[in-house]
Amino acid sequence: MNNIDFIKIEKNHSKLIETAKKHMKSITDFEHNINHMNDVVLYTKELLNSIKLEVNADICLISAYWHDVGRIKVDEGHEKLSAEMLKEEMKKLEYDDELINKCYKAIENHKWNMKPQTAEGIVLKDADKLAWLGVGRWIDCLNNNQNLDSIISLLPKLRDEILYFNESKKIYDRDIIKLIKLLYNYKSSGNKH
């Protein structure tokens, strides 16, 4: 297990993180709102504590908070817009160009059909895809009658075709059971979605 001080990292980047949260609170797509962002952050932290790959935890966390911010304007192409918006915000806050570019690289290829170009991008992509199992997302979607077909169609191939790390596959195995229990209890409670 790695010993990463996430509180320190989040404190060091608090202005960036608060801006991302503000943007994410305005998203009304229940599949990609602030609950999803929070799940991605949690999965990112879990992966950073378990993978045996040298990565920059700051880049991973900043990217986890910012990866879907572009969805405030577009769905298709949001990954590039999210990276651009983060780059602009980081320049305003006078971050150095190297860190800005690494965060950009981590975010720009996080969609299902994309291949990340950096180790941090792989961490982000796995965390983002694991977040499809996030209970908060499912409850939001179910309670708001959001169509779940896109999520459901991706779950069978998520573990073996999309996730990179063995640690991610172990998390999937653990959390798919939580999701099944949630859906069973939701249906048993009289909700029919």
Image (cartoon, helix red, strand yellow):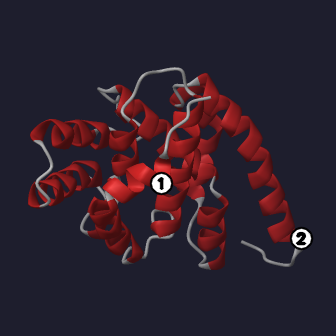
Residue 187 is left or right of residue 164, and the answer is right
Q: Residues within 10 Å of mark 2 (few under 14, many from 20)?
A: few
Residue tagged 2: 188
Q: Secondary structure at mark 1?
A: helix
Would residue 163 be visible to someone looking at this image?
Answer: yes
Q: Amino acid at mark 1?
A: Ile
Q: Which mark is residue 7?
A: 1
Tell me the quadrant of the picture where the N terminus can be found: top right
Residue 75, placed above or below residue 144: above
Identify the residue at the far right of this view.
188
Residue lying at 58% horizontally and 51% vertically, measured from the top left: 132
Q: Residues within 10 Å of mark 1 (few under 14, many from 20)?
A: few
Instruction: Tell which of 186 and 168 is nearer to you.
Output: 168
Residue 57, placed above or below residue 89: above
Residue lying at 56% horizontally and 51% vertically, measured from the top left: 42
Instruction: Tell which of 59 and 167 is nearer to you.
Output: 59
Q: Amino acid at mark 2?
A: Ser
How many numbered badges does the structure rendering display?
2
Whether pointer 2 and pointer 1 mark residues with C-beta atoms closer than 8 Å, the reply is no
Q: Position of residue 102 (x, y in %)?
A: 23, 36
How far is the residue under mark 2 from the one under mark 1?
A: 39 Å
Q: Nearer the viewer, mark 2 or mark 1?
A: 1
Residue lying at 58% horizontally and 57% vertically, measured from the top left: 149
Of mark 2 and mark 1, the one earlier in the sequence is 1
